[in-house]
Image: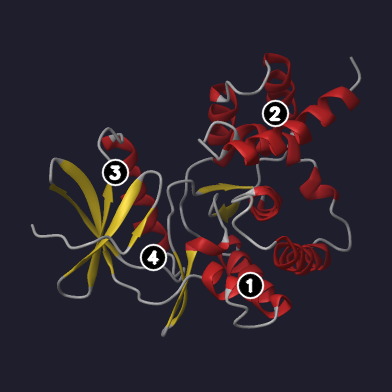
Amino acid sequence: MKLLDPLAQGPCSELYALDGGRVLKLFRSGYAARAIEAELRLARSAHDAGIPTPRAERIIETRGRRGIVFEHCEGPTLLQHILARGAPPERLAEVFFGLQRAVHASAAPFPDMKERVAAKIARAQRAPAALRKLALERLARLPAGAAACHGDFHPANVIMSPKGPMIVDWQDAGRGDAAADAMRSLLLLRYARPGQIDEALRAAFVAAYTACLREAWGGSMQALERWQLPLAVARLAEGAEEAECEKLLQLASTTLSASPS
């Protein structure tokens, strides 16, 4: 199979154009076959549930690597729209939040989200043992929830296609507390890609998204904030950039020092 230059690249995969209006998400060598198969199932579940997302077709192998063939949805990401100041941050935040709430309202049959978060916390070796222990204890007391959650919902995972916004990358999807999904997004919006986004623009988008969350949760952020510690520690297991990890460790450690012994 002849592949041209990748359309996009991430830490775990590259995206290539194929004939017939399709793309190949080609995973890097060593990426677990089981994880690829799980992502295919989750992406199909999201599409079948009516969530706006590219259709996932099948797994293929090329260049000694495995990948998933998807329907090709052209267009810039929502992150690119934000960075280009294509619309006011308030309007783009409303689009982002509306998509996330549509996912929460869907009937997609995703696996349990708390189990995945617990597994990540256990692997977060950057966090001190006491911090991982506290995060797991807090997680155990939080509600299981029954909402469909993307699990990694951020503006780079939304394609602004001619047919409307399309959500991609379902490998972390699960059923759980919608507040957890929203807090995960808020942590990423606040701390991910440090130095690559104008901080004033970041602050404006975060403020607008937070206003949407506050209104949806009856004026209080308490239901979301109780997820902050477990999700911050879980993020440390994902290979985030050093500067982001330092901020998350500081955030989580402040919570640990404020906890009763």
Picture disc at residue 98: 1
Q: What kind of residue is marked 1?
A: Gly
On the image, numbered disc 3 is attached to which residue?
37
Name the quarter where the C terminus is drawn: top right
On the image, numbered disc 4 is attached to which residue?
47
Earlier in the chain: of badge 1 and badge 2, it is: 1
Q: What kind of residue is marked 3?
A: Glu
Question: In this orientation, which residue lies closer to the viewer: 88 or 198?
Answer: 198
Question: In this orientation, which residue lies closer to the viewer: 184 or 77?
Answer: 77
User: How far apart, in angstroms, are the residues tagged by discs 4 and 3?
Assistant: 16 Å
In the rendering, at what x and y percent does residue 2 appear? 9, 60
User: How far apart, in angstroms, are the residues tagged by discs 1 and 2?
Assistant: 29 Å
Earlier in the chain: of badge 2 and badge 4, it is: 4
Picture disc at residue 140: 2
The 10 Å Cα crowd at callout 2, few under 14, some 14 to 19, many 20 or more, is: some
User: How far apart, in angstroms, are the residues tagged by discs 2 and 4?
Assistant: 31 Å
